[in-house]
Amino acid sequence: MKNVEATYKTTTSILKIARKYFAEYGYYDVPLEKIAEEANVTRGAIYHHFKNKQGLFIAVLDSVQKDIAAQIEKAALKSDDPWQQLILGCVGFVNSANAKENRRILLVDAPSALGWDTWRKIDQKNSMRTLQSHINNLKALGYLCDDVDTRLMTCSVSGALNELALNCSQDNTAMSERKVFDTISQLVGGFRRKKC
């Protein structure tokens, strides 16, 4: 039991420090030695727990994705209406993806450091899966036209949100949350049942 607790404490510490460094300096400019030194472990310990730098980055990215998912859910639950939840959740994604501790890891370094296929699989396992589930629910509730392919809608909305997040940094005061909300409303509104 002590070994399990010690391992958890060590890996948690390494992940916290690695996330801080990856967010501030980027994947390519962070040596493992720096993370090991601050975590008070050997470089070998990092290899033992995470295999290599990429493995550590994937674990950090996974924690970023989980934190963003929690923020999306929190934003979505500001409404009881499923359609508004979609929009609010999407705004929540843009805001949390742009948070200083997430932006570089999720939007900038992950696709290049991991390669498109790996990054895409991680995104599908996390953000896209949640979005797909909500969109499937919207279709079941009759919010979407019968001919809407929910998988393609999910891909379209997810891709648009990533681009929107990349182009709406938190430093850009011209892009207010209201503008983001309106843009997302217009984007997803094209899929909504009117006179289908």
Image (tube, helix red, strand yellow):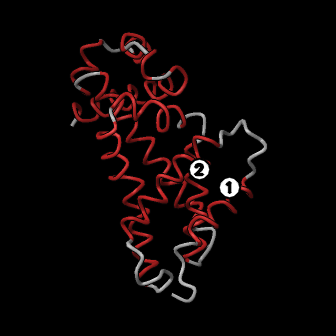
Q: CA distance from mark 2 to mark 1?
A: 8 Å
Q: Amino acid at mark 1?
A: Val
Please name the residue shown 65% across and 39% down the image. 169
The outermost residue toward the bottom is: 195
Determine which residue is flagged by label 2. 94
- The quarter of the picture where residue 119 lies is top left
Specify the quadrant of the image occupied by residue 122.
top left
Q: Is residue 117 left or right of residue 152?
A: left
Decide: marks 2, 1 in contact (CB < 8 A)?
A: yes
Rendered view: 138 above or below 12 = below
Check disc 2 and report its element: helix, strand or loop.
helix
Front residue (pair 180, 146): 146
Image coordinates for residue 2, horizontal then vertical, percent: 23, 32
Query: Residue at 57% of width from left, 86% of height from top?
Result: 194
Q: Residue at x 41, y 34 (%)?
A: 110
In the picture of the structure, the residue carrying the numbered disc 1 is 180
Q: Is residue 27 above or below residue 59?
A: above
Q: Quadrant of residue 63?
A: top left
Residue 154 rendering spot, x and y as whole percentages: 42, 63
What residue is drawn where x is 40% and y is 37%?
61
Query: How far from the left and from the top, in percent, is residue 145?
Result: 47, 82
Nearer to me, 55 or 38: 55
Q: Secondary structure at mark 1?
A: helix
Which disc is residue 167 wearing?
none
Horizontal relation, residue 115 to residue 25: left or right: left
